[in-house]
Image (cartoon, coloured by chain):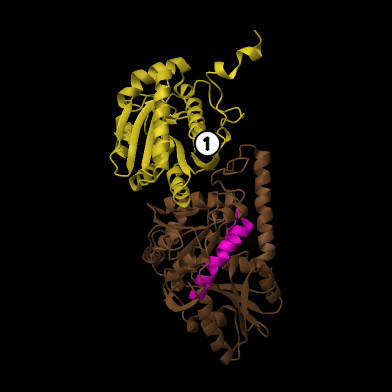
Amino acid sequence: MEEEVRLMKGNEAIAHAAIRYGADGYFGYPITPQSEVLETLAELRPWETTGMVVLQAESEVAAINMVYGGASTGKAVMTSSSSPGVSLKQEGISYLAASELPALIVNVMRGGPGLGTIQPSQADYFQATKGGGHGDYHLIILSPATVQEMTDFVALGFDLAFKYRTPAMILADGIVGQMMEKVVLPPQRPRRTEEELRAQCPWAACGKGDRKNRNVVTSLEMDSTKMEQNNLRFQETYRLIEENEVRCQEYYTDDAEYLIVAFGTVARICLKAIEEAREKGIKVGLLRPITLWPFPKKNIGKLSKQVKGILTVELNAGQMVEDVQLAAECRVPVHHFGRMGGMIPNPTEILEALVTKLSIAQ
Amino acid sequence: MTREEIIRPENKVYARPELLTDNVTHYCPGCSHGVVHKIIAELLAEMNVADKTIGIAPVGCAVFAYNYIDVDWIEAAHGRAPAVATAASRLNPDSLVFTYQGDGDLSAIGTAETIHACNRGENIAIIFINNAIYGMTGGQMAPTTLLGMKTATTPYGRTAELNGYPLAITNLLAQLDGTCYVTRQAVHTAAAVRKTKAAIKKAFQNSMAKKGTSVIEIVSTCNSGWKMTPAQSNDWMAEHMFEKYPLGDLKNE
């Protein structure tokens, strides 16, 4: 398949991107608002073309453990779900992190807590960026704002996951999962051959083959001195990721006197609000974290020395605001404006919140 | 006659399986796990499939199975071995994938994964050690614990009113269209060991031939958990366990 321009939903783009990346397997369970990922894969039947395995599991728990099984054999495997389903996957995600396995997890967030609502949300920020399951670990968290980024982050997520041997997550809000946009699909990449896989993943438990020693994938270590060493190794990986993989985008920050920090599609709504603000002479800039972990602390820290105040806009009760406050180190006031339960703010509301919360004289 | 003269290849009737590692097992003396491990190690060598075998270890007493049999292993979360095996098998269709699970792992926390892997007819072998107790965590009640049996969480004996009934999950698995071979064996006598070995061999052959899921239940002892000697445990098992869990094939297609 060649590069192709199409109009499609973010969820559909994830499916197309997975096939074109040369992913080996997808294991999922239906849940709104991300079921189109599994549905699109079933319709495209990649097992007949690239040989990619697609399976509807009996639960989110089974799906993430299938991902664990596939990743243990060195395969490029993924799952997708939405908030309540991602809660169910947390045990498996902790095992993936602890076993140093590459994998891609997609969370198309809906409003919670509990069964909540099927409307968009960003309320799983804490769960995603602070670990989510038990134990000390992080995932690489990618936050797409466009259907194009939904597509591109599949490849980026897999590449980073294999580079650092740690799971990556695309943390999308329900808006970008459901909305349709123009998207450039990348050309088909071949799946790795068995030889390429064994060369890339000498740790994979895929049958000994010609290897002299057996490979064991496990997160268990009864000797505390060794378990501490394992933890130190994980932390060193996380340090490297924080050093090398921070991604964010800045808009209108050169002359900004105020700063909005927002991620996902909310950042796009904020851009509209910023244009309206600038028409009124309020110099506002936007910082959009693309990686929510590692978090763009340095970029925000630097801007906090330039601006008079920062507002985070989130589809939650105030989650990322805590990381922004830490990054700003009390230099300037940092406030939060959020909508919850599946409600989405409009640009006018955001502008009002900016003016009120940051006490901007007009 | 010197030692070397006695130990000649033509006189050798028994040897430690090559695939059993030199690691000292953590199993209690008299436990059934050691015998089953030996059978698996023998078969993988005899069938010449060790290099393409992926074992899935459970949570439970066999959690360290990967330390004892010299093949590639994946250590699964509690109860999830059949899901892990599903992906390992589908993504590596030329491999021999088997799970090794206890009664708590397979028939309590992992019931859904067990039933659905079997129902999909995954080309895997499930080796199921049923000793009617949670061994690793210190002898608590399992779904397979017999009525009246005393465990750490049923100190006055299991009652149906409080704890429900012993679960013969293998009977249930035999009814699923995805299973091709379901059998219940034991390893308490030399004859039983030979039958179990034949059963596991058949299960491995089925997996390689992609005939569907094979389930080998091995009714086992846990002399530590049962608080008996190994010999008493074997007798008690034959007397009590086989009534609820009778030996023999439940399905052989």
Query: In this structure image, what is the colour of chain A?
Result: brown
Q: Which residues are magenta?
A: A137-165
**B23 shown above or below A191:** above
A26 or A242: nearer the eye?
A26
Residue A122: percent from the left, percent from the top? 49, 67
Q: Position of residue A318 (x, y in %)?
A: 53, 67
Residue displayed at 42% across by 39% down: B125
- Where is residue A354 shown, x and y percent of the image? 56, 80
Q: Give amino acid for label 1.
A: Val
Q: Number of callouts in the render?
A: 1
Judged from this view, the residue extending furthest toward the top is B1
Asked if the stretch drawn in magenta spans residue A144, the answer is yes
Rendered-image quadrant of the C terminus of chain B: top left
Chain B: give its colour.
yellow
Q: Residue at x 42, y 50 (%)?
A: A62
Quadrant location of the N terminus of chain B?
top right
Report whether B101 appears left or right of B172.
Answer: right
**Residue B153 sits above or below residue A84 on the image:** above
Q: Residue A174's spot in the image, x, y percent?
A: 44, 70
**What secondary structure is the magenta-colored segment mainly?**
helix
Specify the quadrant of the image occupied by residue B238: top left
User: Which residue carries the number 1 mark?
Assistant: B63
Front position in the image: A314 or B178: B178
Residue occupying the point 56% across, 84% down: A274
What is the quadrant of residue B181 in the picture?
top left
Residue under the point 47% across and 65% down: A19
Residue B119 seen in the current view: yes
- Residue at mark 1: chain: B
Viewer-nearest residue: A208 or B246: A208
Instruction: Report the front residue among A152 and B1.
Output: B1
Q: Residue A348 in magenta? A: no
